[in-house]
Amino acid sequence: MRLIYSLLFLFFLSGFSFGQRTVSRANQEESNRLYERSLNLYEDGLTEEAIIPLDSSIQLNSFNLDALYLRAVIKELFSDPVGALIDYETIVRINPDYLEAYVGKALIYHQQNNYEEAIRNLNHILNYDGIHETKAIYFKTSGYTKGPSRGGISSVTSLASMREDMLYRRAIVYRDMGEYNKANRDISNLIADNPNYPEYHTVKGMIFNKLNLPDSAIVSFRQALALEPGNKSASYQLHLLDPSYSLPDEIFEDKEFHYAFAKKGFDAFEVGDYDEAIEFYSYAIKASPDESDYYSTRGLAYEKIAEFDLAIQDFEKALELDSYFIANYYRIGNILFKRRSFSKANQYYTIYLSYAPDDERVLFNSAMAHLQLKQTEEGCRKLQTSANLGMTQATQLLNKYCKN
């Protein structure tokens, strides 16, 4: 973060002066023409092709704020937040009323977890007193999709609508920074003005949950679902608090939710709640059945509760999806070893060791399987190799099983 501020500071110390340059009419016209060309390319999805005429437009007229704004948006798309911030800062120095640049800055700072700067820029918009027509679109989804737009009923939105969007964004930033009471204040104001927007009730429910008010959270999620029965986020959150509420089938058709299911499953596994881990990894698998990690971790949870057949089934499925997920070979081997199926266990250990021949733990397990099968020579060879690699237990057992 200090690097970003340093770069911005150096940029503004570089002698760039906004008031010392006049732009000829011909340059303005050519700059606008190049900007329009870039905008057409951008809207056609040809983002890379839009950059060259856009840079040329700004070189001809460094006061072309729409061109600077579009370039900042494109820089964000190409993961250049520092470059985008420089363009946004240039815009607001030339025209402090260009509110979209403050929005762009706020979103970048939020993504970088610089919540104070995000709030400062959002407050500038919310405290703005004047007439303004926005040049950017902001959709209230999981994030904001923004960019210049031409034509259509959504190309211009009122300042009041923009303020509503920014109040919503500020509530999200406050929530993320742990200022739950401030987040609740903002979202409550939004609901007072627009009580029929389900997303506001969903976010309010999440905030109530953070405030350890689960009953109030459940009420908010149910309000969201009453307004929008297919609201997947509200359905998911409600199920977390009230397992008796069944998740709708539609949620499993949205692959975005498999990450949330998997995260919940992982958290449950980490604290030893293996039944819950199995439940949520099963949801994740239903939503995205081709993720080998999900089967592998669910297999570990099954193993923890001694559901060995189901564990092996999941490890095998993980290997079917990704044969290089080699940990699953020794996991299956370990279960078979526990079941005293030593020969089958060694089949899996052997495959694993073909990829990782210096894993002293698996060498030790394989050696013990060989010794159980009276295959002393091979068992002692692997015990010795394991001991050489630092396995203390292997060293201790060499004297017991391999005196000669």
Image (tube, rainbow, N blue to C red):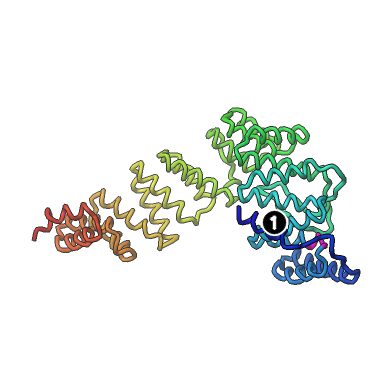
Nearer-the-camera pick, 214 or 66? 66
Nearer-the-camera pick, 250 or 223? 223
- Quarter of the image that includes the C terminus: bottom left
Would you say residue 153 sits in the magenta stretch? no
Residue at position x 78%, y 71% from top?
56
Residue 55 spot, x, y in % from top left:
75, 69
In the rendered image, the residue lying farthest to the left is: 404
Residue at position x 57%, y 40% from top?
247
Residue at position x 57%, y 48% from top?
257
Would you say residue 64 sits in the magenta stretch? yes
The span picked out in magenta is: 63-67
- Answer with the quarter of the image where residue 152 lies: bottom right
| 133 lies above or below 164 | below
Secondary structure, mark 1, is helix
Residue 321 spot, x, y in % from top left:
45, 60
Residue 218 spot, x, y in % from top left:
61, 31
Q: Could you tell me if residue 178 is visible in this image?
A: yes
Disc 1 packing (10 Å; few <14; some 14–19; many ≥20): many
Q: Which three-letter amino acid code belongs to the residue tagged 1?
A: Leu
Nearer-the-camera pick, 106 or 295? 106
Say whether residue 76 is left or right of residue 397.
right
Q: Could you tell me if residue 225 is visible in this image?
A: no
Say whether residue 116 is left or right of residue 371.
right
- Answer with the quarter of the image where residue 244 lies: top right
Residue 110 spot, x, y in % from top left:
65, 48
Residue at position x 38%, y 45% from top?
302
Residue holding disc 1: 85
| 22 lies above or below 211 | below
| 297 lies above or below 363 | above
Q: Main secondary structure of the magenta part?
A: helix
